Image (spheres, rainbow, N blue to C red):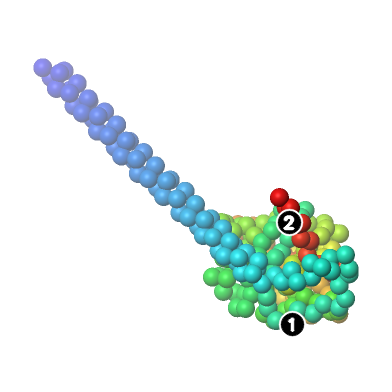
């Protein structure tokens, strides 16, 4: 009889452990699904914001020069913020930039590369147009800009023009060193992000500088005749 009661207790104990394990597993699954769902939602919001920005870009990009595509633009000066498209072919970046606000506003930085208001707007004479971008998390806008090499192309499309910059250098500075976004005596672009990846409030910043090579009209695909 004693042996039977002991067997019953052991069975109950095993059943209790199994039930506890099932509960823990269910909780972990729910947490996992929640985390995946949260990041999926956040990624969706990033894509949604970029889609809205692209609509604004498409509406204001101009393309008023289609009849001049065989010609070379003369001097070009963008005098006020307009939606801009940033393309870096070698690292598969194609994003609409954000402007008109504080570059340290995370609501803007979460949408796309954000223009430093204290920096210049693109032109063919001189000045430094600078953008900040997240490098990790759900955004990854500038995740791979450290892989850029001298001579790699950076395109900045605005108002029907494509500004083509060639990378001059990639450097890491102290987080309080903002010299790379100062005005330049030649037309330039500067991209800025945090260094290293995945460190909250890192002590370093990574900068990429490009020098303007040429300005062309934005390539426009020929409409399908059919």
> Which residue carries the number 1 mark?
79
Of 20 and 44, nearer the camera is 44
Disc 1 residue crowd, few under 14, some 14–19, many 20+, Cα 10 Å: few
Write the residue at 59% across / 59% down: 139
Asked whether, in this view, residue 24 is left or right of residue 88, the answer is left
Position above or below: 198 against 179: above
Instruction: Name the image quarter holding residue 12.
Output: top left
> Judging from the image, what secondary structure is the residue with disc 1 in?
loop
- Which picture quadrant has residue 213? bottom right
Label 2: element kind = loop
Q: Position of residue 45 (x, y in %)?
A: 51, 60
Q: Is residue 98 left or right of residue 34?
A: right
**Mark 2 vs mark 1: in front:** 2
Evaluate whether residue 54 shows in this view.
yes
Mark pair 2, 1: CA separation:
31 Å
Q: Provide residue 129's location: percent of width, then percent of height.
A: 75, 74
Front residue of 50/150: it is 50
Q: Which residue is mark 2?
A: 223
Q: Give the position of the N terminus as an image quadrant.
A: top left
At which x and y percent is residue 66?
79, 67
In the image, 86: left or right of 134? Answer: right
The residue located at (84%, 76%) in the rendering is: 124
């Amino acid at each position: 009889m004693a042996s039977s009661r002991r067997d019953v207790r052991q069975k109950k104990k095993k059943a209790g452990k199994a039930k506890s394990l099932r509960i823990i597993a269910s909780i972990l699954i729910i947490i996992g699904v929640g985390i995946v769902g949260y990041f999926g939602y956040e990624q969706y919001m990033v894509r949604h914001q970029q889609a809205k920005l692209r609509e604004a870009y498409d509406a204001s990009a101009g393309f008023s020069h289609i009849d001049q595509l065989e010609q070379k633009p003369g001097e070009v000066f963008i005098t006020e913020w307009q939606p801009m498209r940033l393309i870096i072919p070698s690292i598969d970046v194609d994003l609409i930039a954000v402007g008109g606000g504080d570059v340290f506003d995370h609501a803007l930085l979460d949408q796309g590369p954000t223009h430093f208001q204290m920096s210049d707007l693109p032109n063919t004479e001189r000045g430094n147009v600078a953008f900040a971008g997240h490098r990790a998390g759900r955004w990854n806008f500038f995740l791979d800009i450290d892989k850029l090499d001298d001579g790699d192309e950076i395109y900045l499309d605005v108002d029907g023009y494509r500004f083509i910059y060639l990378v001059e250098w990639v450097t890491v500075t102290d987080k309080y060193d903002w010299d790379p976004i100062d005005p330049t005596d030649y037309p330039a672009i500067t991209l800025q992000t945090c260094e290293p990846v995945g460190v909250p409030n890192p002590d370093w910043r990574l900068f990429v500088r490009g020098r303007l090579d040429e300005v062309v009209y934005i390539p426009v695909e020929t409409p399908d005749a059919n």
